[in-house]
């Protein structure tokens, strides 16, 4: 990915954007080569983010915790003083949050294209974890 010539960057993924990528662990490992800090923010409860990142072996430098995305982005920008703060999201709401907090916004498909990351197939995380219990199982 072209980081604008500087690796002095903090990169935040909205959880849904991270779920849209085929190999989140590979994405984070790749991003660590050209960023200072990389992590996940979400409106979801902390345990949802933690479960996802553990399952995919993603080691994050920060996460939103019990805060919402907007407050998290503001706090992260203050805590991680880098030249650039880039928020990877999935929709106009994410773009509006980035603008409101002074972060650059990058749609997950554009980020994947620029960095050479593979997007997940059409099956979403929710579909892949659907209840697949059998009728003959108690």
Image (tube, rainbow, N blue to C red):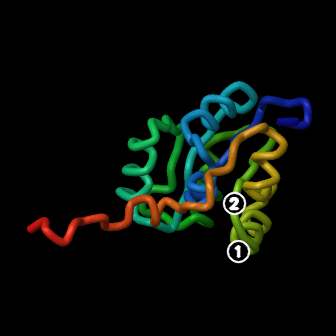
The residue beneath circle 1 is 93
For the point 75% across and 69% down, which residue is it? 100
Q: Nearer the viewer, residue 63 or 49?
A: 49
The residue beneath circle 2 is 89
Left of 36 or right of it: where is 5? right
Q: Residues within 10 Å of mark 2 (few under 14, many from 20)?
A: many
**For residue 121, which quarter of the picture?**
bottom right
Left of 57 or right of it: where is 79? right
Q: Residues within 10 Å of mark 1 (few under 14, many from 20)?
A: few
> Which element carries disc 2, helix, strand or loop?
strand
Residue lying farthest to the top in this orientation = 33
> Which element carries disc 1, helix, strand or loop?
helix
In which quadrant will I find the N terminus? top right
Left of 30 or right of it: where is 39? left
Q: Nearer the viewer, residue 110 or 133?
A: 133
Q: Residue 67, how many percent across, how many down?
A: 48, 64
Image vertical order of residue 93 relative to residue 113, above or below: below
């Amino acid at each position: 990915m072209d980081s604008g010539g500087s690796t002095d960057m903090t990169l935040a993924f909205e959880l849904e954007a991270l779920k849209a990528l085929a190999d989140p662990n590979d994405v984070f490992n790749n991003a660590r080569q050209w960023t200072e800090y990389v992590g996940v923010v979400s409106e979801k409860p902390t345990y949802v983010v933690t479960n996802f990142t553990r399952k995919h072996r993603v080691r994050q430098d920060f996460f939103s915790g019990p805060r919402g995305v907007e407050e998290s982005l503001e706090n992260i920008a203050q805590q991680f003083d880098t030249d650039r703060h880039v928020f990877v999201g999935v929709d106009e709401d994410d773009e509006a949050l980035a603008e409101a907090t002074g972060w650059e916004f990058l749609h997950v498909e554009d980020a994947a294209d620029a960095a050479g990351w593979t997007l997940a197939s059409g099956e979403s995380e929710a579909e892949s974890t659907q209840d697949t219990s059998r009728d003959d199982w108690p």
